[in-house]
Amino acid sequence: MTYSVVWFKRDLRLDDHAALHRAAGQGPVLCLYVIEPSFWRQPDAANQHYQFILECLSDLAAELRRRGGVLHVVTGEVVEVLECLYRQAPFTALHSHEETGNDLTYRRDRAVARWCRDHGVPWHETPQFGVIRRLDSRDAWQAAWETRMAAPRLPVPAMVFSPIPWPDAPPPGPADLGLDAADPPLRQAGGRRQGLAILDSFLDDRSGRYRGGLSSPLSAPTACSRLSPYLAQGAVSLREVVQATRRRLADLPDGPDPRRQGLAAFLSRLHWHCHFIQKLESEPALEWRNLHPGYDGLREGEWNEAHFQALVAGRTGWPLVDACVAMLRETGWINFRMRAMLVSVAAYPLWLHWRPVGLWLARQFLDYEPGIHWSQMQMQSGTTGMNTTRVYNPLKQARDHDPQGRFVRRWLPALRRVPDSWLFEPWRMPPEVQDRCGVRVGRDVPLPIVDLETATRAAKARVHGLRAQPAVKAVVPALVDRHGSRKPAAPRSRPRPVARGQLSLDL
C-alpha cells in the first residue's frame, strides 16, 4: 500500500494545515510527531515548552482518533526515525510545513533533505504563515504577507489513514531528555481547544482593554490576547487568527467601541510577528552573531557572572525588575514592555551580552519563538545598528505602570510592609523606617548591584560612541534594505527603518 508521511512540527492542529491537506489529497497518510532528544538538549529548551507541547499533542491525537486515525509520537532523531519507518514500509512522499527555528532545527532540516534525496522521496514543504523562503527583496514582502493571510482557510481534509503498524511508546519524562523538572505552576495549558477558547474570549471581550492595558504588568495578563504560545506551537494558525480578528472587527456595531481600537492594534502586531521571524529566516546567524558586525566585541569580553546571577535570581535590587523575574518564574509570561525592560537592564546598567541573557529568557518564556526572540534581543541591546536605542529606566517604569506598587508587592512579599514613598527605591529608606516596617535592606531585600544612573550613562555613551563612527554608520543602509519594513509602495532606494515592536510573541 502506498502512503505518505505528514511530519508535524510546530503546527499541532488539523485545521488550516496545508501540508496535511496536500498529503490527504494524494492518498493514505501516516501522521508523525518526533520527540527529538538533541532538540531538548539545546540551551534554549525548557520543560515548560515540553509539557505545553505534550498537551497540544494530546488534543491533536484526540482529533485524529475521532476521524479514525492515529498520531504516532516517536522518540528519536528525525532522520533515524524516517529510516526505520522507510525500511519497514517505504513511503512515497514526506509532507511538512516550513519551519524557521533555531540553528539545530535548521541543520536537522538540511539532514532530512539529504535523506530524502538519497532515498528518492519527495519532501513537500508548505508555508506556515507569512515568512518567505529565499526572499530576494523586502519590497514584495508586505504584499505577499497580505495575500497569504487573505487566502481561504483550509478545512480539515477527508483522510484515509495508512494501516502501517508502529510500536508507540509513552513519551519520555523531562529527566530522560536532560530537562530541568521546573514547570511554572501558573503557566498556560497547551492544546488547540484551550487556544480557541482564549481567542474567543479576546475577540468578544478582552480586546476592549488591549490598547490601554498591554503596557502595565497589572492589566496586561488579561488585556493581552495570550495567544502567543498557541501560535508558537501552531495549535492555532496565524491566518486563522488574522481572519477571525478581521471578521470580528467588521461585525462590531457602529459607534464608539474600545474593541475596535484594540483589534486594530492587535492586527498590527500579528503583522509584526512575521516581520521579525522573516529576519531570522533571511539571516540565521542573528541567533548567535550581532546583526551589525560593527558591534562585535562591544560586550563579549566583559561578561560579569555576578550581574547575570543577580538578574536570574531576581536579586538586582530594583523592585520592578525583580518582580518581573518572579512572575516569569511562576507563570512563564510577562508583558512586552516588561520583557523589553528586562533586556534593557541586562544590556545597559548590567552590561551583559545578549546571547546568554537571551538563552535564559528563552527558557523562561513559554511563548518562545526564535525568530522574534533573537531579533528583539539584539534590538533591545542596541546591536542591530538600524534601530533607535531603547533604554528603559526600571524606576520610571515602576512609577508609570505600577504607581501604587500592587504588582511589586504581589511578587515580592518582602516589600509588602515598605511604605509607598520608599517602595521603588528601598535602599534609600532611613534606618529608623527600616526598623519600623521590619525590612532590612541588604538582608531582606538586596541592594542595587550597580548605581543605576552612573552605569546606564556609561553604557549609553559606549553604544552611542560606537554608533556614531563612520564605518559603523556606513553598514546601516544595507541592513535596512535587507531587513527593514516597507511602506506599501516604498521604493527600494528609500526603505523605511523598522518600527519598534514587541519582545517575543507577546500579543
Image (spheres, rainbow, N blue to C red):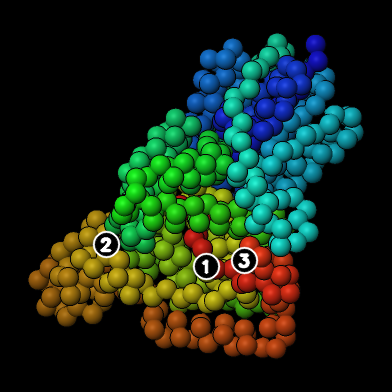
Vertical arrangement, residue 339 with respect to residue 225, above or below: below
Amino acid, disc 1: Arg
Check if mark 3's residue and mark 2's residue have beta carbons within 8 Å.
no
Residue 473: image quadrant is bottom right
Q: Earlier in the sequence, mark 1 or mark 3?
A: 3
Q: Secondary structure at mark 1?
A: loop
In the depicted view, which residue is nearer to us: 66 or 53? 66
Q: Residue 69, image x and y in percent?
A: 61, 15
| In-front residue for pair 268/196 | 268
The residue indicated by pointer 3 is: 487
Q: Residue at x 71, y 34 (%)?
A: 96
Mark 2 falls on what kind of element?
helix
Answer left or right for 480 relative to 220.
Answer: right
Q: Residue at x 23, y 80 (%)?
A: 428
Q: Amino acid at mark 3?
A: Lys
Residue 312: percent from left, percent from top: 44, 60
Q: Which marked residue is nearer to the observer: mark 1 or mark 3?
A: 3
CA–CA distance in space, label 3 to label 2:
40 Å
Mark 1: few, some, or many residues within 10 Å (few <14, many ≥20)?
some
Q: Residues within 10 Å of mark 3 (few under 14, many from 20)?
A: few
Q: Which residue is mark 1?
A: 500
Q: Position of residue 256 (x, y in %)?
A: 31, 54
Q: Which residue is mark 2?
A: 408
230 left or right of 337 in image:
right
Screen quadrant of the N terminus: top right
Q: Quadrant of residue 493?
A: bottom right
